[in-house]
Amino acid sequence: MNESTFCIEMKNLASDGRQIGCRVIPFDTIDSTNTYALREGQLGDVIVADRQTLGRGRVGRTWFSEPGLGLWFTAVVAEPTEGLTFASALAVREAVADRCALQIKWPNDLLYKGKKVCGILVENRNGATAVGIGLNVHHRREDFPEELREKAGSLSSVAGGEWDRAALLRDVLNALDRKVMLLTSGGFETIRRDWADACNLIGRRIRNGALEGVVTEIDGRGAIILDTPSGVERIISGEIGFLDGD
Ligand code: BTN
């Protein structure tokens, strides 16, 4: 069977000069690029698919991954590295910064005007780390399932213009490669300030589960320090909601 244009374009992105994406393994359809990466990926591989039948999100959610609409890909990196999820969010933000200023919603969702355009799922297995990135690119509002339409957006729907998925993947991989090199050489501190600034949380009134309060700090591990009526709390995971507007 002839290789699809999608697979040819994606495979051509493989680069010797970059550690992440030295090999790009494209699929027209796969269950989940993260699942494949954790099972068969080698260091530096990037697995990318036009469609996922079992795309996975955080906290057991599914990730809507229909063909032609987005970039669904996973990079295999060396080992669990502190700050990797934050670095990945920064890399996506940086890759599109010329055309659209994405906000990072703690810890690593990327939003534009309140709509989520990118989600990141980092998983570890047997010493390998899979950085899974789902970036909505071409969706119109009606392309999303009804229950996602208020919350989700795509680069073209929120920022307009033409987006080329191969060029976008190249830019994200270049940025991710740079961020992972920073983490490897100098640890989380090398990116913490940029990431915390992009989250723009200090002084915001938020909710996390039953906790409500004002963010006073993001600490050296990336946790939120929250001033609540019953004392200071440290939040390390979970979804936050804003109580003072988007
Ligand atoms: C989230 O819930 O925000 C994280 C979504 C991560 C989705 C991506 S798409 C590519 C990779 N493969 C998966 O199955 N999930 C991640």
Image (cartoon, rainbow, N blue to C red):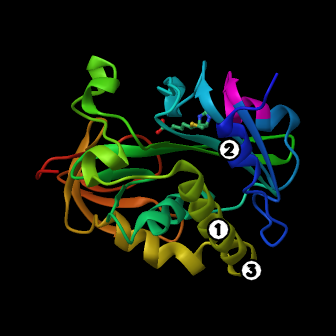
Q: Nearer the viewer, mark 3 or mark 1?
A: 1
For label 1, being within 8 Å of ligand 1 is answered: no
**Which residue does the numbered mark 3 point to in the structure image?**
185
- Residue at 31% across / 36% down in the picture? 152
- Residue at 28% across / 44% down in the picture? 157
The answer to whether residue 35 is above or below residue 99 is above
Amino acid under disc 3? Ser
For label 2, being within 8 Å of ligand 1 is answered: yes
**Which residue does the numbered mark 2 point to in the structure image?**
74
The quarter holding residue 38 reads top right
Q: Residues within 10 Å of mark 3 (few under 14, many from 20)?
A: few
For label 3, being within 8 Å of ligand 1 is answered: no
Instruction: Give the residues in magenta.
Output: 28-36
Nearer the N terminus, badge 1 or badge 2? 2
The answer to whether residue 135 is above or below residue 96 is above
> Callout 1: helix, strand or loop?
helix
Amino acid under disc 1? Asn
Q: Residue 174: which disc?
A: 1
Amino acid under disc 2? Thr
